Structure formats: structure tokens, C-alpha cells
Image (cartoon, grey):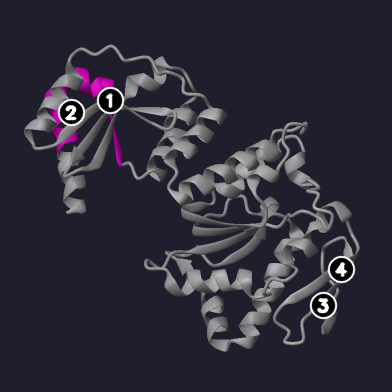
Amino acid sequence: MIEYDYIPRGVCARIIHVELDDAGETIENVAFFGGCPGNLAAIPKLVKGRPVDEVVSLLRTVLTTRKDDETVGIIAFNIHQMNLISDRLEEECSADPEFGRIVEKEEARKDNGEDTGLFVKNVESVQGDERDIIIFSIGYAKDADGKFVQRFGWLNAAGGENRLNVAITRARKRIIIVQSFDPEDLDTEHSACKGPGYLKAYLTYAAAVSSGDHAKASEVLDSLCPPRGDAPVADNGFMDRLCEALNSEGFDTERDLRTGNYVMDIAVRRDGRYVLGIEDDRRGFMNGGTSRERDYHRRHFLASRGWHVVRTWTPSVLKDPEGEIRRIVDEARRTYSQFR
């Protein structure tokens, strides 16, 4: 057995004692001296028997198989995980100089003068950072007695759900979640704050999306924000004329298509796939909601589902309805041409 002691920086634990197998490849035990037992108790259970290269291996895979040179970031649930990942990444880079050069180049990366380099941060320090791909590590597990002690720190505090929201919205294209428990293990019935319930819902939703279980994903979304039953928008015939114009160009149209908690006024299809979504700008105002809900959350949600969305503007419809129709038909043609 190989043993070593690590004196961490900037955390409450004074010493971290690690025991590896004789090959130095697998963790047999981890012990923390000093520190916060609630947050640290699950870590030995999490890492015991698992190759120490596992998390870094995931980063290696992402960096060497990405197809569009995506930017990458790692978010750890707490500072203890952040330091452990950083240290293990440094060790792996020293052991594999070629990988080290890849990581060094990625950490120093800038695109158009903007820092877009690889980072390893904890949830509380990541606000404002975005990358194409995010690896989100959630290092909690059952203890030796099989009990899940849900001492989540910031997540259990009032407003903790806001920090969770920050973490899960840092990815522009894809988020990879590393976890060691089933979301059903979380007991949220007796939680005084919203955070643990949102974490359970998010992990359940992410698992459903990953497995292609769209019905389950919609069920989770509806449980958080039940469909509002958006009232139909009174129409002066413009939307019918718009559908007719699109149909004459070879597009199929579908009215009032629900996607998640939202309604697409016109969904435009061609060759069996949706190429465009059209929103009537009046719907958002008639059904209430803040401007942030109408102009950010709604758009962000629809974009994450692959929708390219355009919006009709009432002033333009009233002033030049034919011009507005031409604009949207042209946009449908342009979007369709990109898919061919």
C-alpha cells in the first residue's frame, strides 16, 4: 500500500491522508483531519475503489475528441472537490507531458482577445464564466452506514437554488454531470429551503434527457412550472396568411405546438424536421410574465431544444403585413438551406 499526506490550501481540513493500492492506481481510503465533517464524510465513500484518473480521464476524453474546438470548464460542488481535481490534474500533466501541453495550451486560451481557457472552479466562484462544455462534479454519497447526510452547504441556505442555477447555466452547448448517487436518494420532503429539491429535479431531468426519455423530462418540467395554458391570441388573419405563404413555398406548418411549458405559435417543418419556430409577440404580454421570462428564459429554453425562433412584431404587422410575411418566409428559406 502507498500512503501520503497532503496539506491543503485555503480549506478547513488540516491534513488529507490518502491510501492507494500497491500499484498506486486505486484509492483504498481517504481520511480528513480537521475540517467540516458533514461536507467531508461522503468523500471517502465516493472515491474508494475508483481509479484516481477517472475525473481527469473524462477531461482528457473531452479535450481529445471534441469536434469543434469547444471551450471547456470544470465546476466542482465545493472547494474541497475543486482542490482535489486541480491537484490530480496537475499530477496527470506532470506524468504525461503531451497531455500537459494540451492542458497548458487550453488554460491559456484566448478567442478574439477574450479569456476562454480551461478552468477548475467551485460553484461559488464561477458566476460570469461560460464555456461550450462544462463538467459538473457533484461529490456526495452515502456514508459507511448507507446513510445520505445531506449537508450541502450553500445549497441548504436560503437562496441556494440561485447558485445552483448559475452552475447549471454555464454551458453553452453541453453539460456533463459526474455524480455518485441516484437522485431518488435525496430526501427533499423535510428540507427547509428550495435548493435540494431543485437539485433533485435537475438531476432527474438531466438523466431523462440523456437517456432520451422525453416524457419524463417534460414531467419534471411540469412539476416545477405547471403549464400555464397560454390563452390563444386574438388574430386578425395575419397568422393564417403567414401559414398560407409558407405552405406555398413547400413548408408544412403546425399551429400552437407545445414544447415544454411554452407554446410555439407556428412550427415550420420541411422534409420531416422542424426548421423554424414563429412566435407572436402579443402572446407573452397577454399571458403576463416578466420581460426576462419573455426575452431570456423562453428563448434560452427553446434554443437548448434546437429551435431557431423568429418573432412577429405587431407594429410591423400593422404597418406592412406583406413585408413581415416576406421577412419570415425568407428566414425559413435561409434556415432550411443551412440544413441541406
Residue that mark 4 sits on: 31
Q: Can you give x and y, in whole percent of width and height, for residue 52 in the image?
A: 68, 74
- Marks 4 and 1 sit apart, C-alpha to C-alpha, by 62 Å
Instruction: Quarter of the image for the N terminus: give it.
Output: bottom right
The residue under the point 40% across, 37% down is: 299
Task: Locate residue 265 relative to residue 242 in the image: left or right.
Answer: right
Instruction: Mark yes or no: residue 108 visible.
Output: no
Q: Earlier in the sequence, mark 3 or mark 1?
A: 3
Residue 320 belongs to the span the image colors magenta: yes
Residue that mark 1 sits on: 313
Residue that mark 3 sits on: 19
SS assignment for the magenta stretch, majority: helix
- In the displayed structure, would residue 272 be above or below residue 41? above
- Looking at the rendered structure, the kind of residue marked 3 is Glu
Residue that mark 2 sits on: 324
Element type at marker 4? Answer: strand
Q: Which residues are magenta?
A: 308-329
Element type at marker 2? Answer: helix
* Quadrant of the image occupied by residue 261: top left
- Marks 3 and 1 sit apart, C-alpha to C-alpha, by 65 Å
